[in-house]
């Protein structure tokens, strides 16, 4: 075989065109997905902000309660604090202090991208015959 026949040359053209068309469809789909993703992220961000506001309020409440608990305990002599009731009180206070009320963060995931693949022109640039 010294060169591509007509059917093979047409196959080469079709392969390049199919790749070009499919890649264009993929690029459009990825672009559309990323646009929708960006809109959804806006509502997720608003929900996170609302949750963080509630967490801050809850932490402020907890801190106020535990501060009163500490003032109450400090006003007592050492002896009642060492009693079973005093130890129970400390465990109760520790339950409040153990609440995890830190604000949350959500990192935006990377947008999908069209991966590098063969360019249709690379197929078209293949010689039709050997030298």
Image (spheres, helix red, strand yellow):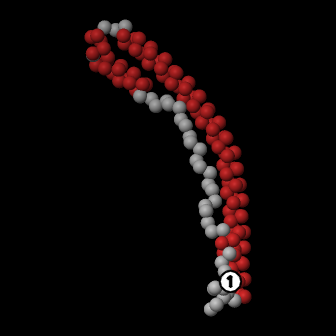
Identify the residue at horizontal 69%, vertical 60% (top origin). 27
Residue closer to the observer: 38 or 2: 2
- Check disc 1 and report the residue beneath it: 128
Whether residue 19 is visible, yes or no, is no
Identify the residue at horizontal 27%, vertical 11% (top origin). 79
Identify the residue at horizontal 35%, vertical 24% (top origin). 91
Instruction: Mark 1: give few (<14), some (14-19) or many (20+) Cα within 10 Å.
Output: some
| Residue 13 position by quadrant | bottom right
Residue closer to the observer: 9 or 88: 9
| 105 lies above or below 124 | above
Residue closer to the observer: 30 or 83: 30
| 93 lies above or below 112 | above
Quarter of the image that includes the N terminus: bottom right
Query: Circle 1 — which element?
Result: loop
Image coordinates of residue 118 in percent, x first then y, are: 63, 68
Whether residue 21 is visible, yes or no, is yes
| Residue 70 position by quadrant | top left
Image mark count: 1
| 79 lies above or below 3 | above
Tell me: 103 left or right of 13.
Answer: left
Identify the residue at horizontal 61%, vertical 61% (top origin). 115
Image coordinates of residue 15 in percent, x first then y, are: 68, 76
| Residue 55 position by quadrant | top right
Residue closer to the observer: 73 or 110: 110
Image coordinates of residue 17 in percent, x first then y, are: 72, 73
């Amino acid at each position: 075989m010294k060169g591509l026949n007509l059917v093979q040359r047409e196959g080469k053209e079709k392969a390049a065109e199919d790749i070009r068309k499919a890649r264009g469809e993929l690029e459009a789909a990825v672009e559309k997905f990323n646009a929708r993703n960006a809109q959804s992220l806006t509502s997720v961000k608003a929900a996170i902000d609302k949750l963080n506001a509630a967490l801050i309020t809850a932490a402020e409440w907890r801190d106020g309660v535990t501060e009163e608990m500490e003032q109450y305990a400090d006003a007592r002599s050492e002896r009642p604090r060492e009693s079973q009731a005093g130890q129970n009180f400390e465990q109760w206070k520790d339950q409040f202090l153990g609440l995890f009320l830190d604000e949350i963060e959500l990192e935006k995931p990377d947008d999908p991208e069209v991966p590098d693949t063969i360019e249709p022109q690379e197929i078209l640039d293949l010689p039709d015959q050997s030298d």
